[in-house]
Image (spheres, rainbow, N blue to C red):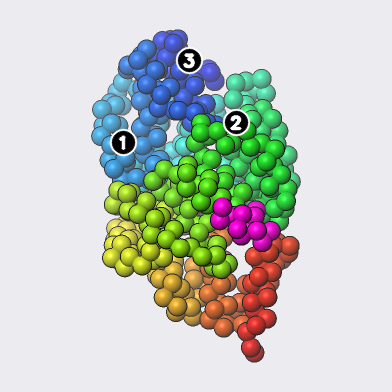
Amino acid sequence: MATDAQGLTLSRANAEASVHFDKAVRAFTLGYGDVNAHLTTAQEHSPDCPMAELLRIWLLALSNDPTQIAKANEQLATLADTTLNERERAHREALQLTINGRWPTAVAALDRHLLNSPHDLTAHQCAMRLDGYLGRFHRTAGRSARALPSWSKDQPSYGIMMSFYGFGLEELGDYARAEAVSRKAAELEPYGYWPHHAVSHVMEMTDRPDDGIAWMNERQQFWTNPNCNNRVHIWWHKALFHIELGQFDEALAIYDDEILTAIRPVGTQLCNLTALLWRLEMLGCEAGDRWLHQHTLWQQQASGICSPFNEIHAVLAALRADDTSAYDTLLSGMRGAAADGRELAPTYRDVAVPISEAMASFVRGNYTDAVERLLPVEPNLWRMGGSIAQRDLIEWTLTEAAVRAGLRDVALSLANERLALKPDSAVNQHFLDAVQTISF
């Protein structure tokens, strides 16, 4: 019976299928390469290999696209539990939970499986991705710490496991260790998305934009290649470094020349466009017709409510494109999700809906209302999903709304908080300067 590179059994697979399955897993966990192409080759050699089919279904289920999720559900139904081994059953269970929108329970199922199977790279990646959708990327540090002692440093993809650990440490706030671990992981896996991404986050969170740009430039050959599936997000990070340095034109050029040329009309990528343009416009950059074009891309997404993080960004694009009908449809869908009793309902009720209503108030010039709606959400902002750096978009908007509302005490308090974390930030200095213009 064939095994994968980590020594785990691959049911109904021959040696050739195993080789291509391993290539698919590496592409999936590195964020580099064509996962589906490798799976197709694996299934040509062993058409009935369950893990190859399960990984293909994971790609659909993690898309946060309703059409793709429906397809995942159809394909999963063809895999009967009675024909699967223990690992495959664990993946099937977690997949069904994910497809049903039960993300926390799906992560719990994967975590339980990983206690028995710490070498299952696919399970590690899926759990991390789902935790990211839940705003809990930091949990990856603990999950990886449980598994790494079972790994040999000479084992294939050890650097990938290290990269998971490094990113979890960053989101946990352990920046020194996160940088050290992630730099080592980047040496072992130079084309890996996660180690490069983790160091970028460390530079962002520790107020080191010059170091961040240098890091990007040193490694440009590894992340600008079209095989890098997440290069759009890395360009987004580079744009943030320019913003922190007050180089707004450079950031806008990245939007136009790099991100737009590489973007695919899927929610996880479009969020980068929305978050970047929203920030730049608040800093005085002219958006021109960019919002209309961006909203058109969002409209190419299948209708449906399945990801609070993505839908909040879709709301921003609809508001800026002045498409009231699209905004109302999104808000109605989120209100429905808030009342449907499923696991994500509290997030929609307590976080996504209030943020969406606040952003409408902000765009329509009712800044005091935006502040009053966002302040109660701020302690629970993590629940919208994404990383700390991504969620800063909402805190940034809260601060700007307080400035525009003339709420001096609120705006000063928020600006002081931002400056305490990043005292050299041009953005945070901009907020402080704006506060000084508000009369007592």
In magenta segment, residue 127: no
Residue at 54% x, 40% y is 231
Give, as a three-letter code, the residue at label 3.
Val
Whichever of callouts 3 and 2 sits on the residue coming sooner in the sequence is 3
Residue at which label 3 appears: 19
Q: Give the mark toward the camera: 3 or 2.
A: 2
Q: Are marks 1 and 3 in contact (CB under 8 Å)?
A: no
- What kind of element bears circle 3? helix
Indicate the position of residue 249 as horizontal and vertical percent values: 60, 58
Measure the alpha-carbon separation of dots 3 and 2.
19 Å
Residue at which label 2 appears: 191
Residue at 67% x, 74% y is 432
Please identify the quadrant where the C terminus is shown.
bottom right
Q: Is residue 370 left or right of residue 44?
A: right
Looking at the image, residue 392 lies above or below residue 171: below
Give, as a three-letter code, the residue at label 2.
Tyr
Give, as a three-letter code, the residue at label 1.
Ala
Q: Main secondary structure of the magenta part?
A: helix
Q: Is residue 253 left or right of residue 79?
A: right
Residue at 63% x, 43% y is 198
Q: Residues within 10 Å of mark 3 (few under 14, many from 20)?
A: some
Q: Are marks 2 and 1 in contact (CB under 8 Å)?
A: no
Q: Which mark is residue 72?
A: 1
**What are the residue bounds of the magenta stretch?**
240-253
